[in-house]
Amino acid sequence: MKKIALVLGLSAVAGAAVLGCATLPGDAELDQMAANMAKTAFRDQGIATVDRVSGIDDTLKACSAADVAGKPLDAARTKAIEEANLKTIKWPADGKFLGDWKAGEAIAQNGRGLTWTDTAGAANGGNCYNCHQISKEEISFGTIGPSLYNYGKIRGVADPASAEAKPIVEYTWGKLWNAKAYNACSNMPRVGHSGILNEKQIKDVMALLLDPASPVNK
């Protein structure tokens, strides 16, 4: 939304500047233009509320600004964002990281949820195949993210409960919960942090990726 607002806003003021009627606005004015457009162009509809486009946090603001500027964040800002997001990760309450890989596959396949026709509290899909290859049996998948086929096998996770596997298991959980803890401006949704998936669902997706019995690791 911010990109659209910036493009439209800049186009308008650039045209005026050519006519000698205006100068380019500063960041604060562009932010206000974007906020005004969000108020006039969007409305709350069911669980889909305007704050999805206007209520973005500091992480998204920083990454959006860097994207518009066409240059990456500096090292210090990147580190600060990743450290802040790392603190938001909620680890499994019972200390168990893996659930049912079959349920995880269903979640990965499902892109449904969070639309204005859905009800609050309804379980969402993960839509994981939109960006990743996962199970070999599924031939339709996106390539925005890396292939996750053989995810656990490649990383040597023969027993996810072992001490040797702990670093990979914890990293995978953290990456699913809040990807920006490891890559400040990652395109991956923060599925736990944003409430897209609940704890049980994340456990099931973890099993899909790491359980030796999962087809992902065959």
Image: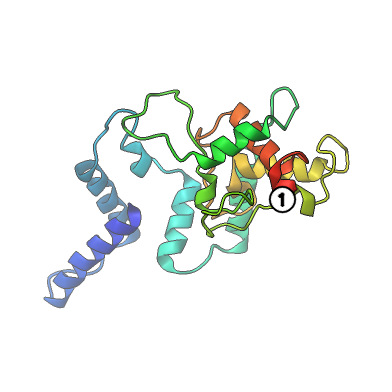
177 is higher (above) or lower (below) than 62 = above
Q: Position of residue 110 (x, y in %)?
A: 49, 38
95 is higher (above) or lower (below) than 72 = above
Q: Secondary structure at mark 1?
A: helix
Q: Position of residue 187 (x, y in %)?
A: 51, 54
The image quarter containing residue 158 is top right
Q: Determine if residue 139 is in view.
A: yes
Q: Nearer the viewer, residue 139 or 12?
A: 139
- Report the residue at 44% width, 25% height from top: 122
Crowding near the residue tagged with mark 1, few <14, some 14–19, many ≥20 C-alpha atoms within 10 Å = many
Q: Nearer the viewer, residue 132 or 140?
A: 140
**Label 1: which residue?**
151
The image quarter containing residue 113 is top left
Q: Nearer the viewer, residue 22 or 124?
A: 124
- Report the residue at 48% width, 27% height from top: 123
Q: Position of residue 131 (x, y in %)?
A: 53, 53
217 is higher (above) or lower (below) than 49 = below
Q: Is residue 164 found left or right of 68 in the rendered image?
A: right
- Kind of residue indicated by mark 1: Tyr
Q: Is residue 26 found left or right of 215 in the rendered image?
A: left
Farthest-out residue, front: 137
- Report the residue at 64% width, 34% height from top: 102
